[in-house]
Image (spheres, grey):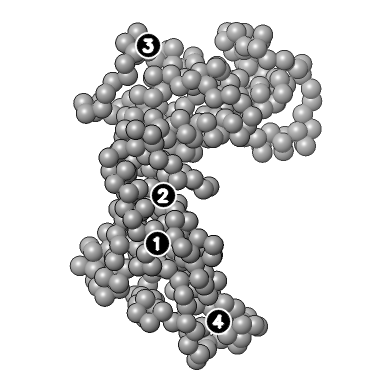
Protein backbone atom coordinates (compact mmCIF):
# COMPACT_ATOMS: atom_id res chain seq x y z
CA UNK A 1 0.00 0.00 0.00
CA UNK A 2 1.27 3.46 -0.85
CA UNK A 3 2.48 5.32 2.28
CA UNK A 4 0.58 8.39 3.32
CA UNK A 5 2.64 11.54 3.75
CA UNK A 6 1.60 14.73 5.46
CA UNK A 7 4.16 17.38 4.70
CA UNK A 8 5.27 20.63 6.26
CA UNK A 9 8.51 21.33 8.14
CA UNK A 10 8.18 17.85 9.58
CA UNK A 11 6.34 14.91 8.16
CA UNK A 12 4.05 12.25 9.50
CA UNK A 13 4.50 9.21 7.30
CA UNK A 14 2.98 5.82 7.80
CA UNK A 15 1.48 2.77 6.20
CA UNK A 16 0.85 0.75 9.34
CA UNK A 17 -2.72 -0.16 10.22
CA UNK A 18 -2.70 2.21 13.20
CA UNK A 19 -1.52 5.19 11.17
CA UNK A 20 -3.92 4.45 8.33
CA UNK A 21 -6.73 4.53 10.88
CA UNK A 22 -5.47 7.90 12.15
CA UNK A 23 -5.28 9.33 8.63
CA UNK A 24 -8.79 8.14 7.82
CA UNK A 25 -10.16 9.74 11.00
CA UNK A 26 -8.41 13.02 10.18
CA UNK A 27 -9.98 12.96 6.73
CA UNK A 28 -13.44 12.50 8.27
CA UNK A 29 -13.12 15.31 10.84
CA UNK A 30 -11.33 17.82 8.61
CA UNK A 31 -14.32 20.03 7.84
CA UNK A 32 -15.84 19.87 11.30
CA UNK A 33 -15.54 22.85 13.63
CA UNK A 34 -15.54 20.66 16.73
CA UNK A 35 -12.62 20.79 19.16
CA UNK A 36 -9.89 18.17 18.66
CA UNK A 37 -7.59 16.72 21.32
CA UNK A 38 -4.36 15.26 19.86
CA UNK A 39 -2.43 13.11 22.32
CA UNK A 40 0.93 11.44 21.94
CA UNK A 41 4.47 11.36 23.25
CA UNK A 42 6.91 14.11 22.37
CA UNK A 43 8.06 13.76 18.77
CA UNK A 44 5.03 11.85 17.47
CA UNK A 45 3.85 14.76 15.29
CA UNK A 46 1.06 16.50 17.19
CA UNK A 47 1.60 19.94 15.62
CA UNK A 48 1.95 18.48 12.14
CA UNK A 49 -1.31 16.58 12.69
CA UNK A 50 -3.02 19.79 13.83
CA UNK A 51 -1.73 21.58 10.75
CA UNK A 52 -3.05 18.83 8.50
CA UNK A 53 -6.49 19.12 10.09
CA UNK A 54 -6.42 22.86 9.43
CA UNK A 55 -5.28 22.42 5.83
CA UNK A 56 -8.04 19.87 5.25
CA UNK A 57 -10.76 22.19 6.52
CA UNK A 58 -12.79 25.06 5.15
CA UNK A 59 -10.64 27.31 7.35
CA UNK A 60 -7.45 26.56 5.40
CA UNK A 61 -7.31 30.05 3.83
CA UNK A 62 -7.31 31.65 7.27
CA UNK A 63 -4.51 31.67 9.87
CA UNK A 64 -3.13 28.64 11.65
CA UNK A 65 -1.64 29.75 14.96
CA UNK A 66 0.34 27.27 17.05
CA UNK A 67 1.40 28.04 20.60
CA UNK A 68 3.14 25.87 23.18
CA UNK A 69 1.55 26.49 26.54
CA UNK A 70 4.68 25.12 28.21
CA UNK A 71 6.76 28.10 27.06
CA UNK A 72 5.04 30.72 29.18
CA UNK A 73 4.86 31.32 32.90
CA UNK A 74 1.53 31.53 34.68
CA UNK A 75 1.71 35.33 34.60
CA UNK A 76 2.47 35.51 30.86
CA UNK A 77 0.22 32.87 29.36
CA UNK A 78 -2.98 34.90 29.73
CA UNK A 79 -1.46 37.87 27.90
CA UNK A 80 -0.09 35.58 25.17
CA UNK A 81 -3.39 33.85 24.53
CA UNK A 82 -5.87 36.67 25.12
CA UNK A 83 -3.79 39.80 24.56
CA UNK A 84 -3.66 42.85 26.80
CA UNK A 85 -4.79 46.47 26.97
CA UNK A 86 -2.44 49.40 27.30
CA UNK A 87 -1.51 49.89 30.95
CA UNK A 88 -2.51 46.36 31.99
CA UNK A 89 0.94 45.89 33.52
CA UNK A 90 4.32 47.55 33.59
CA UNK A 91 5.63 47.75 30.04
CA UNK A 92 2.22 47.40 28.36
CA UNK A 93 2.51 50.63 26.38
CA UNK A 94 -0.10 49.72 23.76
CA UNK A 95 -2.96 47.35 23.06
CA UNK A 96 -1.81 43.94 21.86
CA UNK A 97 -3.99 41.16 20.44
CA UNK A 98 -3.44 37.62 21.70
CA UNK A 99 -3.11 34.37 19.80
CA UNK A 100 -6.87 33.76 19.74
CA UNK A 101 -7.48 37.06 17.95
CA UNK A 102 -4.58 36.41 15.56
CA UNK A 103 -6.20 33.09 14.60
CA UNK A 104 -9.55 34.73 13.74
CA UNK A 105 -11.38 32.68 11.13
CA UNK A 106 -8.78 29.92 11.29
CA UNK A 107 -7.39 27.42 13.76
CA UNK A 108 -5.48 27.75 17.01
CA UNK A 109 -3.37 24.85 18.22
CA UNK A 110 -2.77 24.83 21.98
CA UNK A 111 0.11 22.40 22.36
CA UNK A 112 1.18 21.18 25.81
CA UNK A 113 -2.29 21.87 27.17
CA UNK A 114 -1.29 19.59 30.05
CA UNK A 115 1.09 22.33 31.26
CA UNK A 116 -1.60 25.01 31.61
CA UNK A 117 -1.94 26.08 35.27
CA UNK A 118 -5.28 25.50 37.01
CA UNK A 119 -5.99 29.22 37.24
CA UNK A 120 -5.76 29.52 33.46
CA UNK A 121 -7.83 26.40 32.82
CA UNK A 122 -10.93 28.21 34.12
CA UNK A 123 -10.46 30.98 31.54
CA UNK A 124 -9.88 28.50 28.72
CA UNK A 125 -13.08 26.72 29.68
CA UNK A 126 -14.97 30.00 29.32
CA UNK A 127 -13.52 30.49 25.83
CA UNK A 128 -14.62 27.00 24.80
CA UNK A 129 -18.10 27.57 26.17
CA UNK A 130 -18.77 31.12 24.98
CA UNK A 131 -16.27 31.63 22.13
CA UNK A 132 -15.34 35.00 23.62
CA UNK A 133 -12.20 36.35 25.28
CA UNK A 134 -11.28 39.36 27.40
CA UNK A 135 -7.89 40.97 27.03
CA UNK A 136 -5.78 41.25 30.14
CA UNK A 137 -6.59 44.59 31.78
CA UNK A 138 -9.70 45.08 29.64
CA UNK A 139 -13.43 44.85 30.25
CA UNK A 140 -14.66 44.43 26.67
CA UNK A 141 -15.77 40.98 25.56
CA UNK A 142 -14.27 40.04 22.19
CA UNK A 143 -15.94 37.28 20.15
CA UNK A 144 -13.53 34.85 18.46
CA UNK A 145 -14.28 32.59 15.51
CA UNK A 146 -11.60 29.90 15.75
CA UNK A 147 -11.37 26.15 15.74
CA UNK A 148 -9.48 24.88 18.77
CA UNK A 149 -7.10 21.93 18.60
CA UNK A 150 -5.26 20.98 21.78
CA UNK A 151 -2.20 18.78 22.13
CA UNK A 152 -1.10 16.83 25.18
CA UNK A 153 1.91 14.62 25.85
CA UNK A 154 0.32 13.27 29.04
CA UNK A 155 -2.88 11.37 29.82
CA UNK A 156 -5.35 14.14 30.70
CA UNK A 157 -7.87 11.66 32.09
CA UNK A 158 -5.27 10.50 34.61
CA UNK A 159 -4.42 14.12 35.39
CA UNK A 160 -8.11 14.71 36.11
CA UNK A 161 -8.07 11.75 38.52
CA UNK A 162 -4.96 13.19 40.17
CA UNK A 163 -6.61 16.59 40.58
CA UNK A 164 -4.16 18.30 38.21
CA UNK A 165 -6.57 19.05 35.35
CA UNK A 166 -10.17 20.28 35.39
CA UNK A 167 -12.66 17.58 34.48
CA UNK A 168 -15.05 20.03 32.76
CA UNK A 169 -12.23 21.40 30.59
CA UNK A 170 -11.11 17.86 29.71
CA UNK A 171 -14.56 16.98 28.38
CA UNK A 172 -14.77 20.25 26.46
CA UNK A 173 -11.45 19.44 24.77
CA UNK A 174 -11.98 15.72 24.21
CA UNK A 175 -14.77 16.03 21.64
CA UNK A 176 -12.75 14.52 18.77
CA UNK A 177 -9.79 12.59 20.25
CA UNK A 178 -6.79 11.68 18.08
CA UNK A 179 -4.19 9.38 19.66
CA UNK A 180 -0.82 9.23 17.88
CA UNK A 181 1.05 5.97 18.59
CA UNK A 182 4.74 6.09 19.52
CA UNK A 183 7.16 4.87 16.91
CA UNK A 184 8.06 1.74 18.89
CA UNK A 185 4.42 0.60 18.45
CA UNK A 186 4.45 1.02 14.67
CA UNK A 187 7.89 -0.23 13.73
CA UNK A 188 6.74 -1.24 10.28
CA UNK A 189 6.72 2.49 9.45
CA UNK A 190 10.42 2.92 10.27
CA UNK A 191 11.79 1.90 6.82
CA UNK A 192 9.33 4.27 5.13
CA UNK A 193 10.33 7.10 7.44
CA UNK A 194 14.03 6.38 6.93
CA UNK A 195 13.71 6.50 3.17
CA UNK A 196 11.63 9.66 3.29
CA UNK A 197 13.97 11.63 5.55
CA UNK A 198 17.18 10.43 3.88
CA UNK A 199 15.79 11.46 0.50
CA UNK A 200 14.86 14.85 1.92
CA UNK A 201 18.26 15.65 3.42
CA UNK A 202 20.49 14.16 0.72
CA UNK A 203 18.55 15.98 -2.01
CA UNK A 204 18.60 19.18 0.02
CA UNK A 205 22.40 18.87 -0.06
CA UNK A 206 22.26 18.29 -3.83
CA UNK A 207 23.42 14.68 -3.55
CA UNK A 208 22.03 11.38 -4.78
CA UNK A 209 20.34 9.22 -2.18
CA UNK A 210 22.58 6.24 -1.39
CA UNK A 211 21.44 2.71 -0.65
CA UNK A 212 20.79 1.77 2.97
CA UNK A 213 22.62 -1.32 4.16
CA UNK A 214 20.54 -4.08 5.79
CA UNK A 215 22.60 -3.71 9.00
CA UNK A 216 21.53 -0.06 9.31
CA UNK A 217 17.90 -0.92 8.64
CA UNK A 218 18.03 -3.63 11.27
CA UNK A 219 19.61 -1.27 13.82
CA UNK A 220 16.92 1.35 13.17
CA UNK A 221 14.22 -1.29 13.57
CA UNK A 222 15.61 -2.50 16.90
CA UNK A 223 16.28 0.90 18.46
CA UNK A 224 13.64 2.15 20.94
CA UNK A 225 13.26 5.72 19.54
CA UNK A 226 12.35 7.52 22.78
CA UNK A 227 12.20 10.75 20.76
CA UNK A 228 9.91 9.12 18.19
CA UNK A 229 9.71 10.52 14.64
CA UNK A 230 11.56 13.71 15.58
CA UNK A 231 14.55 11.69 16.81
CA UNK A 232 14.52 9.48 13.72
CA UNK A 233 14.46 12.56 11.47
CA UNK A 234 17.45 14.03 13.34
CA UNK A 235 19.32 10.73 12.95
CA UNK A 236 18.69 10.75 9.20
CA UNK A 237 19.81 14.38 8.90
CA UNK A 238 23.05 13.50 10.70
CA UNK A 239 23.67 10.61 8.29
CA UNK A 240 23.14 12.92 5.30
CA UNK A 241 25.65 15.38 6.73
CA UNK A 242 28.38 12.85 7.51
CA UNK A 243 28.02 9.94 5.07
CA UNK A 244 30.59 10.14 2.27
CA UNK A 245 30.29 6.61 0.88
CA UNK A 246 27.93 5.22 -1.71
CA UNK A 247 25.96 3.20 0.83
CA UNK A 248 24.66 4.16 4.27
CA UNK A 249 26.60 1.79 6.52
CA UNK A 250 26.74 1.28 10.27
CA UNK A 251 29.73 3.62 10.47
CA UNK A 252 27.51 6.46 9.27
CA UNK A 253 25.15 6.06 12.22
CA UNK A 254 25.22 7.72 15.60
CA UNK A 255 27.15 5.50 17.99
CA UNK A 256 24.40 5.93 20.60
CA UNK A 257 21.74 4.51 18.28
CA UNK A 258 24.01 1.78 16.97
CA UNK A 259 25.07 0.36 20.32
CA UNK A 260 21.72 0.82 22.08
CA UNK A 261 20.04 -0.95 19.19
CA UNK A 262 22.58 -3.76 19.48
CA UNK A 263 21.72 -4.22 23.16
CA UNK A 264 18.02 -4.75 22.41
CA UNK A 265 16.67 -8.24 21.73
CA UNK A 266 15.30 -8.85 18.28
CA UNK A 267 11.55 -8.51 18.01
CA UNK A 268 10.15 -11.83 16.79
CA UNK A 269 7.12 -10.03 15.36
CA UNK A 270 9.34 -8.11 12.93
CA UNK A 271 10.46 -9.73 9.69
CA UNK A 272 14.21 -10.13 9.37
CA UNK A 273 15.87 -8.61 6.31
CA UNK A 274 15.46 -10.97 3.37
CA UNK A 275 19.11 -10.79 2.35
CA UNK A 276 20.77 -13.76 4.07
CA UNK A 277 24.26 -13.16 2.73
CA UNK A 278 24.34 -9.47 3.66
CA UNK A 279 22.65 -10.07 7.01
CA UNK A 280 25.55 -12.20 8.26
CA UNK A 281 27.14 -11.15 11.58
CA UNK A 282 29.54 -8.21 11.35
CA UNK A 283 32.67 -8.25 13.50
CA UNK A 284 33.10 -5.38 15.95
CA UNK A 285 36.51 -4.51 14.43
CA UNK A 286 34.88 -4.14 11.01
CA UNK A 287 32.22 -1.80 12.40
CA UNK A 288 34.77 0.32 14.25
CA UNK A 289 36.99 0.53 11.16
CA UNK A 290 34.00 1.59 9.10
CA UNK A 291 33.04 4.21 11.68
CA UNK A 292 36.62 5.55 11.78
CA UNK A 293 36.76 5.77 7.99
CA UNK A 294 33.48 7.68 7.79
CA UNK A 295 34.45 10.15 10.51
CA UNK A 296 37.78 10.87 8.87
CA UNK A 297 36.07 11.29 5.49
CA UNK A 298 33.63 13.73 7.07
CA UNK A 299 36.44 15.79 8.65
CA UNK A 300 38.37 15.93 5.37
CA UNK A 301 35.24 16.94 3.50
CA UNK A 302 34.41 19.74 5.96
CA UNK A 303 38.02 21.00 5.97
CA UNK A 304 38.35 20.80 2.16
CA UNK A 305 41.16 18.28 2.49
CA UNK A 306 43.24 20.32 4.95
CA UNK A 307 44.78 17.70 7.24
CA UNK A 308 45.61 20.14 10.03
CA UNK A 309 42.04 21.38 10.19
CA UNK A 310 40.67 17.84 9.93
CA UNK A 311 42.88 16.77 12.84
CA UNK A 312 41.51 19.68 14.90
CA UNK A 313 37.95 18.61 14.12
CA UNK A 314 38.69 15.05 15.21
CA UNK A 315 40.75 16.22 18.22
CA UNK A 316 43.74 14.09 17.30
CA UNK A 317 47.32 14.88 16.30
CA UNK A 318 48.01 15.65 12.66
CA UNK A 319 50.57 12.83 12.50
CA UNK A 320 48.00 10.39 13.92
CA UNK A 321 45.51 11.50 11.28
CA UNK A 322 48.05 10.90 8.54
CA UNK A 323 48.62 7.34 9.74
CA UNK A 324 44.87 6.67 9.89
CA UNK A 325 44.27 8.14 6.43
CA UNK A 326 46.87 5.74 5.06
CA UNK A 327 45.45 2.80 7.03
CA UNK A 328 41.92 3.46 5.77
CA UNK A 329 43.11 4.06 2.22
CA UNK A 330 41.47 7.50 2.01
CA UNK A 331 44.31 9.41 0.39
CA UNK A 332 43.09 8.73 -3.13
CA UNK A 333 39.46 9.68 -2.49
CA UNK A 334 40.25 13.15 -1.04
CA UNK A 335 42.26 16.06 -2.37
CA UNK A 336 44.60 16.56 0.58
CA UNK A 337 46.21 19.91 1.43
CA UNK A 338 49.56 20.08 3.18
CA UNK A 339 50.01 21.70 6.59
CA UNK A 340 49.20 25.36 7.10
CA UNK A 341 49.32 27.45 10.23
CA UNK A 342 45.89 27.81 11.76
CA UNK A 343 44.90 31.41 12.42
CA UNK A 344 42.32 32.43 14.99
CA UNK A 345 39.78 32.79 12.19
CA UNK A 346 40.48 29.24 11.05
CA UNK A 347 40.03 27.95 14.59
CA UNK A 348 36.70 29.75 14.85
CA UNK A 349 35.54 28.20 11.59
CA UNK A 350 36.51 24.77 12.90
CA UNK A 351 34.53 25.30 16.08
CA UNK A 352 31.49 26.24 14.00
CA UNK A 353 31.78 23.09 11.88
CA UNK A 354 32.30 20.96 14.98
Q: Report the disc number at residue 45.
A: 2
First in sequence, mark 1 or 3: give its number. Answer: 1
User: Which is nearer the eye, 180 or 264?
Assistant: 180
Depth check, mark 4 against mark 2: the one in front is 2
Q: Secondary structure at mark 2?
A: loop
Q: CA distance from mark 2 to mark 1?
A: 20 Å
Tell me the residue that label 1 is attached to: 31
- For label 2, the crowd category at 10 Å Cα-Cα, with few meaning under 14, some 14 to 19 and many 20 or more, is many
Q: Residue at x 29, y 65 (%)?
A: 174
Tell me the residue that label 4 is attached to: 84
Q: CA distance from mark 3 to mark 2?
A: 34 Å
Q: Secondary structure at mark 1?
A: loop
Q: Secondary structure at mark 3?
A: loop
- For label 3, the crowd category at 10 Å Cα-Cα, with few meaning under 14, some 14 to 19 and many 20 or more, is few
Depth check, mark 1 against mark 3: the one in front is 1
Residue 98's spot in the image, x, y percent? 53, 75
Q: Please, is residue 70 above or below residue 262 in the view?
A: below
Determine if residue 220 is in view.
yes
Q: Is there CB contact under 8 Å for labels 3 and 2?
A: no
Q: Is residue 75 left or right of residue 184?
A: right
Depth check, mark 2 against mark 1: the one in front is 1
Q: CA distance from mark 4 to mark 1?
A: 32 Å
Q: Quadrant of residue 74?
A: bottom left
Determine if residue 260 is in view.
no
Q: Please, is residue 352 above or below residue 326 in the view?
A: below
First in sequence, mark 4 or 1: give its number. Answer: 1
Q: Is there CB contact under 8 Å for labels 1 and 3?
A: no
- For label 4, the crowd category at 10 Å Cα-Cα, with few meaning under 14, some 14 to 19 and many 20 or more, is many
- For label 1, the crowd category at 10 Å Cα-Cα, with few meaning under 14, some 14 to 19 and many 20 or more, is some
Amino acid sequence: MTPVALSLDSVVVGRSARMRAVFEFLRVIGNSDSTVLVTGESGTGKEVTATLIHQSSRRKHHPFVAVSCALFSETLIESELFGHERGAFTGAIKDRPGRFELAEGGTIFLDDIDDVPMSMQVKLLRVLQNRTIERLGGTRTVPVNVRIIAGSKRDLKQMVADGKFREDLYYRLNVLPVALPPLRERREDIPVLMQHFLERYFRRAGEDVPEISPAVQQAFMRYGWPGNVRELENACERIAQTCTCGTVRVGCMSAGILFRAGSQPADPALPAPSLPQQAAPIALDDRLRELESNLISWALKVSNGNKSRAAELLQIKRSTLGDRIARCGLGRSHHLVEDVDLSHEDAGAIEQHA
